[in-house]
Structures are given as C-alpha cells and as structure tokens.
Amino acid sequence: MLADGCRMQNFYCFYNILKDKSSHNTVDQKCLLLLDNHASHVSIQAIDFCKENGIVLLSFPPHGTHKIQLLDRAVFGPFKKMINTATYNWMRNHPDRTMTIHYIPGIVKEAFPLSVTDKNAIAGFSCTGISPFNRNIFTTVDYAPSSVTDRPL
C-alpha cells in the first residue's frame, strides 16, 4: 500500500505514484502489481505506463478483496465481536457510569487475547485459500457484473 499527498486517490495520483515508485522496473525485469479494482487504477495513461515499464497488473474482482484479507476474515472479525461483547458486559456491569475513552484499554485487554490467537491466524490462511491452496476461492459468480443495465453508453 502506498500513501502520498492526495487526500482522495484518483487516477492522477495513482499515475504519479507509479512513475515515482517504478524507477527500477524494466520490460526485462518485470514487477507484479496487485490492484483492488478501484476505479482510480484504471486509466489509459497508467496502463500504458505499466506496459512500457514492465509492470504486470493483476486486478482482483470487484468487491472481492475481502476474500483474500486473511487478518480481516480470521482475526479482526472475531476481535470486533469480542470488543462488542466486552463493551456490552462493561455497560451491563456499570449501569451508573458513562463509558469514556479511558475504559477502552481495559476492554481491548479483555478482547485481544481471546481473538488474536494462533488458531485464528492459521484459520485465515485456510479460509482465504492460501494454505492449503484453493484455486476455487473465487467462483464465476465473483466475476459477474454487480449490476446490469440497458442504458446506452
């Protein structure tokens, strides 16, 4: 992931980042760039630049990156549930208090060790198809258009 001075990523920012970060790439020494299929990555200028500089673009299907985010799927999901449970328990046990930012570390301390575990991290590799390898994580449905219209272009 790259960060630059642009508040919102657009194709001009993306193109400038490409130019800045790709000084070591050549057509003979290719580089693979994984994209999340965001509209800001699709411009003729950026695609032509990548072709000329040996950058191979691989884009994941729209709305599909969640399938390969192993920490989001196997660790942060359970962590969020544990945070919600710990917060609910705190409010139930302290009905006379208002929760402030000062109570958050205690809630995180309770939720973190229950969700950020070796077992959950290992499960992330499995559910994303990394290990054991599963080439069928994405199905033909994932590549289908998200909407269809008969409106003329």
Image: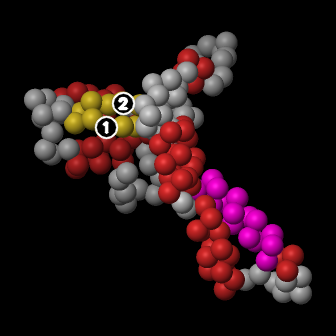
For label 1, the SS is strand
| Corner quadrant of residue 90 | bottom right
At 57% from the left and 49% from the top, the residue drawn is 74
Within 10 Å of the Cα at label 2, are there few (<14), some (14-19), or many (20+) other Cα atoms?
few
The one of 4 and 86 positioned closer to us in this rendering? 86
Specify the farthest residue to the front. Answer: 119
Q: Quadrant of the C terminus?
A: top right
Magenta span: predominant SS is: helix
Q: Is residue 127 left or right of residue 17?
A: right
Q: Residue 58: which numbered mark, if any? A: 2
| Corner quadrant of residue 19 | top left
The one of 107 and 14 positioned closer to us in this rendering? 107
For label 2, the SS is strand
At 54% from the left and 38% from the top, the residue drawn is 127
- Residues drawn in magenta: 76-90
At 67% from the left and 17% from the top, the residue drawn is 149
Q: Amino acid at mark 2?
A: Leu
The one of 144 and 123 positioned closer to us in this rendering? 123
Residue 46: percent from the left, percent from the top? 31, 34
Residue 33: percent from the left, percent from the top? 31, 37
| Corner quadrant of residue 3 | bottom left
Mark 1 lies on residue: 33
Q: Amino acid at mark 1?
A: Leu
Position above or below: 92 against 30: below
At 61% from the left and 76% from the top, the residue drawn is 109
Report whether residue 49 is seen: no
